[in-house]
Each structure stands twice: as C-alpha cells, then as structure tokens.
Image (spheres, grey):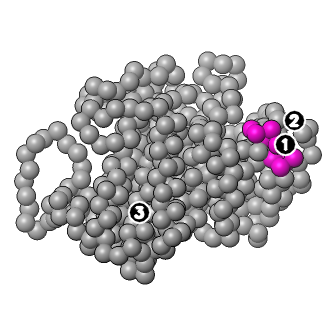
C-alpha cells in the first residue's frame, strides 16, 4: 500500500471548504482534470482506501472501533488524559458535538463517501468496460462502508454532496448503499475487472465477495432479512478480503492503541461480557482476541490482540462468521428457528483450522431452548465474540434491544451520537441532537 501515500495531494483537491478562492498549482491536477482523466480514476480509487483505513487516530477504522467499543464497555480507557476517548466512554452529556472521535468519524467517512461519489460519477471516462467495472465496484464498496459506518452511530446523515445537504434517516442511507452495491455487483458479474485495473489497484479486496458481504451486512441492519440471507449465502467463505498494511501505511489500531498501554484495551478477558452474555470459558476465540497466556512479557502488553498485532497486520473487511451469523439472525427474525440454529451452529462448532483467518470457537452445538428470544441471545453472544472490537457492538446492542442509557443494567452509554459542531455550523439542515 505504499503507493497510496502519494495520493494525498490528489485527494486534497476534493476537500470541501468555505473559501471560494482557488490558487492553482501548475504541478498538480485540477479537480476538473481529476474528474475527467481516465488515468486519475484508479489512483483516486486507491485514495478511498487510504482515507478509510490509514492515518492513525484520524482514520475511519480507528474511530469506529473506538466508538463502538467505548460506548458499550467492550473497551476501557487506560489513560484518562485521552480526553476525547474518555468522554465518549462516559457517554450521556459528556459526549458532546465538540468530541474529536465524533468529528473525525463524521468528517472522514463523509469525505470517503463524497470522493466515492465523484469516482462513480466519472467512471464512464475509464478506457474500457473491464476497468470501468472494477472502478465502479471499488468505489461502491467504500461508499457503502462510509454510509454504513455513519448509520451505526447517527440517526440521520446526508448522502449527497451539496451546500446545505439534506439529511435522510439511517435506514434510507443503508438502502442507498445497498442499491449502489447491487448495481456494482451486477456490472462486475457481467464484465469482470480488467487486468489493467487489477494491476494498478491496491491489492487485498475481493471485489465480488465484498460486494455481497456488504449487501448482507447493511440489509440486515436495515431490516431487509430476505436480501441479507441471499447475499450472505453468495459469499465464498474460503476467500479473504482484507485491508493490507505495511510499516509506512500502518494498521491504525495497532499503531494507536493495541501496540501500547496508553489509550484503550479490552475491558476484561471476557471482552466486557458478563451475565447472560458471558462467553463460554472454553470458547477458543477468546485467546485469539485476548492475550491471556502467562507469563506475559514485561512490561505487560495491551490485552487486545486479534487483527491488531503489528503495523503490517491485515484487517478483514468481513470475517466468514459474520456472514453465518447474518443468516442465523435473519432466519430467527423471520421465525425460522430450525434454520437459524443450523447457521448458528456453523459458527459455534467451527474450528480455527476451518476458518481462513484462524477464528474458531470449537464449541458444542447449541443445546438451549429453541425460542426466538433464546436463539437470538446466543446469536448476539456469538456476534460479540466473533466480531470483537470491529466496531459493531453499539449497532448490535440497539438492534437486539439490550438495555440502553438510563435503563437498569444499561449496556451502552449512548443510543446515537450528537452531530459534530463542524456540520452544525456549516449546514442549517442539521437535525436536533438525539436525547441520548
């Protein structure tokens, strides 16, 4: 991924600002040239991944893991001097619209979405059908990741770039992301990505499978269970799709947090889960995600492990177990409990050697009551472990109706986040902040 650092100047021409003055540098591309030049479209597509994944504390990846984990007790603050993270963990009124995590999550994801829209609007300028197909697939993936991430934390959001952009509710945003993914998937199935595209794009993403995985993920969140079932079933679970990193473009969670004892780490060796949600002590996923084997080296490392173990550790776009649990949940919510248990057991009984990322629970099959409430509870328990600190826990906690702010035994400190000050001060269409 070294080549995407050179895209910073290219991306800077797309950043929206309040100043109308334009100072042209003859050594750089103008926005019009970027929009219309076929040679610029693939580098600009690479830049989408750069903005989403790299940049340490600024990256969307860092901020969604921090937000989802700190709002639900999955992660704990190690140093209260990290005031933005600390206030987010407290939630309630301590989380205001000046919070840096909220601001970075919003602005960086919106920039990814806006840049992806720009690529999609100009994909027709690509020289051949296979290159166009690859560009559309790639940009659609990052547009969906941006919108889907924002929809996990905000009740409403803009889905277009314009002055005073209107807001739509989060389900509408998820559905527009899915619609674009479906368009891209159909185009890619008809015309595979060209050799030229594959040679020039940052490696790691499996386009066809990632399109289906994200259709499944965001359809589930939007309540479209039939669509989620079908798309998750089309994902080849033997194929990897990852964000790659190296010592220059670093894994943002290892770089900022899991490589030190200064920011945050898992709350407990049971991932902050207790009571009815406590994982089985025999669950072999726990040592995958938590450093617990003594003797620990001195000084004691961050307890967090998983996909954040080194600067060059790849981060999955999705894991196979997510697709199986999407199918289990969709079946359960449709009232088909036997099929829900079948899919759930594919996760419970999976061993590490049968998983492309080495992630396996190796547990017995589900033996609890076959009621919707009990089966959904075990699905949630397995989501919390299988998808540990990947940014999904706040969304999952709300969707499964777990106790929220102010309720006895509250499991999250917020339901949704306030809109960042930068948006409110520049967009009069910004809605009122949620109460909690």
Asked whether residue 337 is drawn in magenta, I would say: yes
Q: Name the residue beneath numbered marker 1.
A: 337
Q: Position of residue 414 (x, y in %)?
A: 54, 27
Residue at the image point whose x is 49% and y is 68% from the top: 188
> Which quarter of the figure has residue 135?
bottom left
Q: How many marks do you count on the picture?
A: 3
Q: Earlier in the sequence, mark 2 or mark 1?
A: 1
Secondary structure, mark 3, is: helix
Q: Give the alpha-carbon distance from disc 2 to disc 3, as whole Å.
A: 43 Å
Q: Give the alpha-carbon distance from disc 1 to disc 3, as whole Å.
A: 38 Å
Q: Name the residue beneath numbered marker 2.
A: 371
Mark 2 and 3 residues: CB-CB less than 8 Å, in contact? no
Q: Name the residue beneath numbered marker 3.
A: 136
Q: In the rendered view, does 229 fall on the left or right side of 307?
A: right
Could you classify mark 3 by the number of other residues whose Cα lies within 10 Å: few (under 14), some (14-19), or many (20 or more)?
Answer: many
Q: Earlier in the sequence, mark 2 or mark 3?
A: 3
Answer above or below: position of 413 versus 27. above
Answer above or below: position of 285 versus 277. below
Mark 2 and 1 residues: CB-CB less than 8 Å, in contact? yes
**Can residue 59 be seen by looking at this rendering?**
no
Secondary structure, mark 1, is: helix
**Can residue 157 be seen by looking at this rendering?**
yes
Q: Which residues are magenta?
A: 332-341
Q: Earlier in the sequence, mark 1 or mark 3?
A: 3
> Which quarter of the figure has residue 375?
top right
Answer above or below: position of 22 versus 278. below
Residue at the image point whose x is 76% and y is 70% from the top: 353
């Amino acid at each position: 991924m070294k080549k995407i650092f050179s895209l910073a100047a290219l991306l800077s021409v797309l950043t929206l600002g309040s100043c109308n003055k334009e100072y042209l540098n003859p050594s750089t591309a103008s926005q019009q040239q970027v929009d219309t030049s076929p040679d610029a479209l693939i580098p600009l597509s690479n830049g989408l991944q750069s903005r989403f994944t790299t940049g340490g504390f600024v990256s969307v990846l860092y901020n969604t893991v921090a937000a989802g984990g700190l709002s639900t007790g999955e992660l704990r603050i190690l140093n209260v001097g990290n005031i933005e993270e600390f206030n987010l963990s407290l939630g309630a009124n301590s989380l205001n619209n000046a919070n840096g995590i909220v601001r970075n999550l919003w602005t960086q994801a919106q920039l990814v979405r806006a840049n992806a829209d720009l690529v999609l609007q100009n994909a027709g300028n690509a020289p051949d059908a296979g290159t166009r197909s690859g560009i559309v697939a790639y940009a659609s993936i990052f547009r969906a990741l941006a919108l889907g991430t924002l929809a996990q934390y905000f009740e409403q959001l803009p889905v277009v770039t314009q002055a005073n952009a209107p807001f739509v509710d989060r389900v509408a945003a998820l559905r527009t992301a899915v619609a674009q993914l479906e368009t891209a998937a159909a185009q890619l199935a008809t015309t595979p990505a060209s050799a030229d595209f594959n040679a020039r794009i940052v490696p790691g993403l499996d386009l066809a499978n990632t399109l289906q995985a994200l259709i499944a993920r965001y359809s589930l969140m939007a309540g479209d269970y039939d669509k989620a079932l079908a798309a998750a079933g089309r994902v080849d679970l033997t194929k990897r799709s990852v964000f790659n990193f190296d010592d220059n473009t670093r894994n943002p969670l290892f770089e900022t947090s899991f490589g030190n004892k200064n920011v945050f780490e898992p709350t407990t060796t049971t991932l902050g889960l207790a009571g009815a949600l406590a994982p089985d002590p025999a669950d072999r996923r726990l040592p995958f995600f938590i450093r617990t084997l003594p003797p620990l080296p001195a000084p004691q490392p961050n307890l967090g492990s998983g996909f954040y173990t080194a600067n060059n550790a790849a981060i999955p776009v999705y894991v196979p177990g997510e697709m199986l649990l999407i199918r289990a949940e969709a079946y359960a919510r449709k009232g088909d409990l036997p099929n829900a248990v079948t899919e759930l057991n594919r996760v419970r009984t999976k061993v590490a050697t049968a998983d492309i990322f080495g992630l396996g629970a190796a547990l017995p099959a589900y033996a609890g009551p076959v009621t919707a409430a009990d089966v959904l509870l075990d699905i949630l328990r397995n989501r919390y472990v299988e998808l540990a600190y990947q940014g999904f826990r706040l969304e999952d906690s709300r969707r499964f109706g777990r106790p929220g702010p102010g309720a006895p035994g509250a499991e999250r400190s917020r339901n949704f986040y306030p809109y960042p000050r930068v948006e409110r001060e520049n967009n009069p269409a910004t809605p009122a902040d949620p109460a909690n």
